[in-house]
């Protein structure tokens, strides 16, 4: 059966069809008019106000990812460093935050955090069949978000420095300044990042940079005071004494000839821990304590050789075993003294 629709109804359906076509056309991600940033995005996003990078890719999503990756590489090449890491970018929307991750196998100083990253709508260049996108960071907005991170690092550094300044024992002071130096290096990394975001704002931290740069000199000054007199009991053929003297010298101490010339005394007791006789077995051990002139123990280490040494006399057993003890002690003591460097 054939139905003839009224003219008004057919006209209304035609209008609806045209609206539908117009709606779906507006939902596509392409435009006949190229955006202003396509030809020269540096003009639209001047370097004085923005950090911006343009990408070209096979899809709209890839174009967005590559654009932010290029910004990350910009930071990586601008901040000199030698650690391999992942680059994390934080993108702020109108009412929500989105976290994305871009992995780059390049040498960087530390983890790079991208603040306030925004994007243009990706544009499809039909002649090339390639998508373009610009990722950009507004410097003022990014600095507002990043400043608390810089200030937190600054606060941590000065807290560490204050602890070191108030310490009186030279060896302990070296350790405290070492911690302040490690904290200071992290602070400097934050400042390098801040310099890229907003050089004018970062310049306000010039005195803080100077304070960090003075720490190595303070460590060196305290090392000069770390003079130690070595006293060894139970040695054989000066084996342990020579080894300990070398170990202490290699780890920041100056070995003094007399006790009066030193700020510290290193007392070492060597025990053969002999078992049996004819033959005799030894498991030599070393107990080392370093004390200040005030009698405070500032360092202690115990070391024992688990490997048994057998000989027909105690002297021959010591002659064989003590060089082994010296090597073991050197490794153990050096590992612990690293904290004082």
Image (cartoon, rainbow, N blue to C red):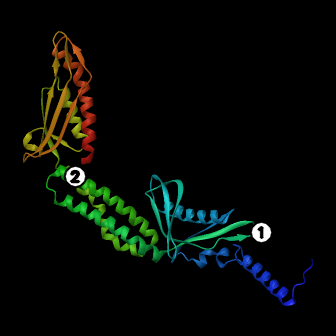
Q: CA distance from mark 2 to mark 1?
A: 66 Å
Quadrant of the image occupied by residue 336 = top left
330 on left or right of 290: right
The relative height of residue 272 versus residue 185 in the rendered view (above or below) is above
* Labelled pair 2, 1 in contact (Cβ < 8 Å): no
- Sequence-wise, the earlier of marks 2 and 1 is 1
- The residue indicated by pointer 1 is 127
Any mark on residue 141, and which?
A: none
Q: Identify whether 128 is placed above or below 321.
A: below
SS for tag 2? Answer: helix
In depth, the one of 56 and 62 nearer the eye is 62
Q: Nearer the viewer, residue 24 or 36?
A: 24
Where does the image place residue 218, in percent across and percent down from the top left? Answer: 23, 57
Location of residue 120 by image quarter: bottom right
Residue 290 is at least partly visible in this image: yes
Q: Residue furthest right?
A: 1
Q: Position of residue 151 (x, y in %)?
A: 33, 69
The residue positioned 60% from the left and 66% from the top of the image is 64
Which residue is tagged 2?
174
> Height in image: 246 above or below 59?
above
In the visual, does 181 lie left or right of 255?
Answer: right
- SS type, badge 1: loop
Q: Is residue 167 left or right of residue 125?
A: left
Task: Answer left or right for 92 relative to 247.
Answer: right
Residue 335: x percent and y percent? Answer: 28, 40
> In the rendering, at what x and y percent does residue 264 appear?
12, 44
């Amino acid at each position: 059966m054939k139905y003839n629709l009224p003219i008004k109804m057919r006209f209304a359906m035609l209008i609806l069809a045209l609206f539908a076509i117009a709606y779906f056309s507006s939902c596509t991600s392409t435009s006949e008019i190229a955006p202003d940033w396509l030809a020269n995005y540096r003009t639209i996003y001047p370097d004085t106000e923005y950090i911006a990078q343009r990408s070209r890719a096979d899809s709209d999503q890839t174009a967005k990812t590559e654009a932010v990756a290029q910004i990350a590489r910009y930071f990586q090449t601008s901040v000199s460093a030698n650690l391999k890491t992942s680059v994390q970018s934080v993108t702020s929307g109108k009412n929500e935050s989105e976290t994305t991750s871009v992995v780059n196998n390049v040498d960087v100083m530390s983890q790079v955090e991208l603040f306030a990253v925004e994007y243009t709508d990706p544009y499809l260049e039909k002649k090339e069949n390639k998508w373009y996108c610009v990722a950009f960071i507004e410097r003022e907005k990014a600095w507002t978000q990043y400043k608390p991170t810089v200030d937190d690092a600054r606060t941590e550094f000065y807290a560490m420095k204050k602890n070191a300044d108030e310490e009186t024992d030279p060896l302990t002071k070296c350790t405290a300044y070492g911690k302040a130096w490690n904290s200071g290096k992290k602070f400097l990394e934050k400042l390098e990042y801040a310099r890229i975001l907003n050089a004018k704002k970062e310049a306000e931290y010039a005195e803080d940079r100077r304070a960090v740069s003075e720490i190595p000199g303070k460590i060196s000054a305290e090392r000069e005071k770390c003079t130690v007199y070595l006293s060894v009991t139970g040695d054989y053929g000066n084996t342990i004494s020579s080894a300990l003297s070398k170990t202490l010298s290699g780890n920041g101490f100056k070995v003094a000839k007399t006790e009066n010339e030193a700020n510290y005394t290193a007392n070492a007791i060597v025990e053969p821990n002999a078992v049996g006789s004819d033959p005799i077995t030894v498991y030599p051990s070393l107990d080392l304590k370093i004390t200040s002139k005030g009698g405070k123990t500032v360092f202690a280490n115990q070391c024992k050789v688990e490997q048994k040494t057998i000989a027909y006399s105690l002297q021959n057993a010591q002659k064989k075993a003590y060089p082994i003890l010296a090597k073991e002690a050197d490794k153990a003591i050096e590992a612990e003294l690293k904290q004082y460097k």
